[in-house]
Image (cartoon, helix red, strand yellow):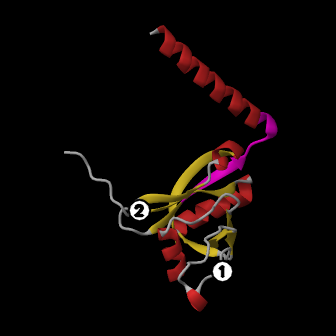
């Protein structure tokens, strides 16, 4: 029996450049504190997390610079598009992430914003280390080689 895909479970925004610019060490799922018009705007499929990042401030983790545009029918109760949004994580996860950011020089990068099976907005957050320019070139070289290798194998057999 095939599993039905839940219409509520879908990707809203993805940060494709993150995997190219950062070496991903660990990922985890975090909830978001949102206001009503933000949720409605996300349901319409509008969001951008390309330039955003997460920051540890005052024992809490915040999503900074994520753009969720104003809801079209929101009138005067609309939200600010680039406001800081609190991330919901357990105390243990927050402590582990803040230690990694402070001691090891890691960065918290959002990878994907989506609705889970229950219809709640979630953020896939990565603990990452920035790549140097030569590392990025190596990544491109490796990807091109894998593509070429797949082509050769397909031709031969």
Q: Is residue 54 left or right of residue 36?
A: right
Which residue was labeled with disc 1?
80
Q: State the image coordinates of residue 17 (x, y, percent, origin top left).
A: 67, 48
Q: CA distance from mark 1 to mark 2?
A: 24 Å
- Which of pointers 1 and 2 indicates the residue nearer the eye? 1
Q: Quadrant of the C terminus?
A: top left
Q: What secondary structure is found at the residue carrying circle 1?
A: loop
| Magenta highlight range | 124-135
Which of the two residues, 78 or 111, is positioned nearer the viewer here?
78
Rendered image: mark on residue 116: 2
Q: What secondary structure is found at the residue carrying circle 2?
A: loop
Residue 35 in sight here: no
| Magenta residue check for 127 | yes
Rendered image: mark on residue 35: none
x 59%, y 24%: residue? 147
x 74%, y 54%: residue? 105
Q: Count of labels shown?
A: 2
| Magenta residue check for 126 | yes
């Amino acid at each position: 029996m095939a599993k039905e895909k839940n219409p509520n479970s879908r990707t809203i925004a993805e940060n494709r450049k993150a995997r190219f610019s950062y070496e991903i060490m660990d990922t985890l799922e975090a909830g978001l504190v949102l206001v009503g018009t933000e949720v409605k705007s996300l349901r319409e499929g509008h969001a951008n997390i390309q330039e955003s990042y997460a920051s540890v401030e005052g024992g809490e983790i915040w999503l900074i610079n994520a753009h969720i545009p104003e809801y079209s029918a929101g009138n005067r109760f609309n939200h600010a598009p680039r406001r800081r949004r609190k991330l919901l994580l357990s105390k243990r996860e927050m402590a582990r992430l803040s230690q990694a950011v402070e001691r090891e020089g890691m960065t918290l990068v959002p990878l994907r914003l989506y609705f889970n099976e229950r219809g709640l907005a979630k953020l896939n957050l990565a603990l990452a280390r920035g790549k140097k320019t030569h590392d990025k070139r190596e990544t491109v070289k490796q990807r091109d080689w894998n593509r070429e290798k797949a082509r050769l194998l397909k031709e031969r057999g």
